[in-house]
Each structure stands twice: as structure tokens, then as C-alpha cells.
Amino acid sequence: MRCPFCQTDDTRVIETRVNDEQGAIRRRRECQDCHRRFTTYERHEEPQLFVIKKDGRREQFDRDKLLLGINRACQKRPVSREKIAEAAFAIERKMRDTLKDEVSSQALGDMVMKSLRNLDEVAYVRYASVYKEFADLTSFREEIEKMFSRARQDRLTELQQSLFEE
């Protein structure tokens, strides 16, 4: 592994940890020349995924682009980086679990929406406003009303479950 600071190839591994949640191996390394330390992450190579855009174009799936979209929706919201990374990893895992090498941008957007709904309601509405291309205030209000309806239904279900547990 090449040192990112002095570019020498002489580095050694100090510590290795397996991160099961993100499917990566984290290695702490030290350069033998400049003695600076750095971290690397290793992932096993998986088949390429492609996203089929609305206009029919095929674009290679980009994990960073997915993270960027979720980060933008969660900007200035109390959602940790870890939760955002977990959400992105779960979405990518779902896509790979289908065993298909292509997924529609619609399906990907729906997965992001579902994930954001569970993370933060404001982030969900932010993402929905761009993803669903709200044309006016009425369509925006309708989406918020759907959220309130789902929240009422969820509370009702929780109340019913707690009554059955007693």
C-alpha cells in the first residue's frame, strides 16, 4: 500500500478490524519512511450495478452519488453520519440482493424515500420535493398529508399492539 503522504510503498499494517455492517475491512497502517499513520478500507469486488435513468440511459451505480443525495436531504438535521452511511449501505445491499445488474432510477428513488421516511421526516420531504418534482404547493401539501396519515396509522397500530400485549 502506498503512503498518501510521502508516496513510498513501504507501509505496514498496525491494526485490522472487520466492519460487518458495511462489508469492509478497516486497516490502520503506518509508513516505514515518514512514520505517519493512515486508514484504508478494503471491500471485496462485487459485480457492477447500473441505474436505468428515466430517459433510458444506463449509468453505473455510484455509492458516493447515493450518499451525496441522502446527505443533502439530511443537511442541518439531527441525523448522524453513521445512520446516513447505514442507510446507503442498506439500499445498495437491497439492490445487490435482487441479483440483477440493473435497477431503475424509480426503484432506487423509492428505496431512498422509504429509508429517509424512517430516518427523518423533514429529510424525507426535502428528498421527495426533488424526487417527485412537485409542480406546486398543492402536490407538496398532499405528500405531507400522506405522511400525517401514515403517522396516525402507525400510532394506531402501536396502540393496538400494546393493548394485545396487556
Image (cartoon, rainbow, N blue to C red):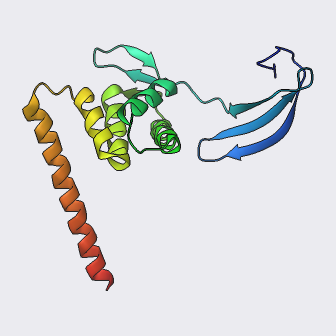
Q: Is residue 133 above or below residue 78?
A: above
Furthest residue to the left?
138
Q: Quadrant of the C terminus?
A: bottom left
Residue 12 percent location from the top left of the image: 88, 30
Residue drawn 34% across the image and 46% down it: 120
Residue at 29% from the left image edge and 45% from the top image edge: 121
Q: Quadrant of residue 36?
A: top right
Q: Is residue 49 above or below residue 87?
A: above
- At which x and y percent is residue 62? 49, 23
**Percent from the top left, x then y, of residue 127?**
30, 33
Q: Is residue 80 left or right of residue 29?
A: left
Residue sitting nearer the eye, 65 or 35 = 35
The number of callouts visible is 0
Q: In percent of the image, x 81 and y 23: which residue is there?
A: 1
In this rendered view, identify the residue nearer to me: 114 or 147: 147
Q: Position of residue 154 (x, y in %)?
A: 24, 61
Query: In the image, is 164 to the left or to the right of 5?
Result: left
Q: Residue at x 34, y 26 (%)?
A: 105
- The answer to which quarter of the image holds residue 39 is top right
Outermost residue toward the front? 76
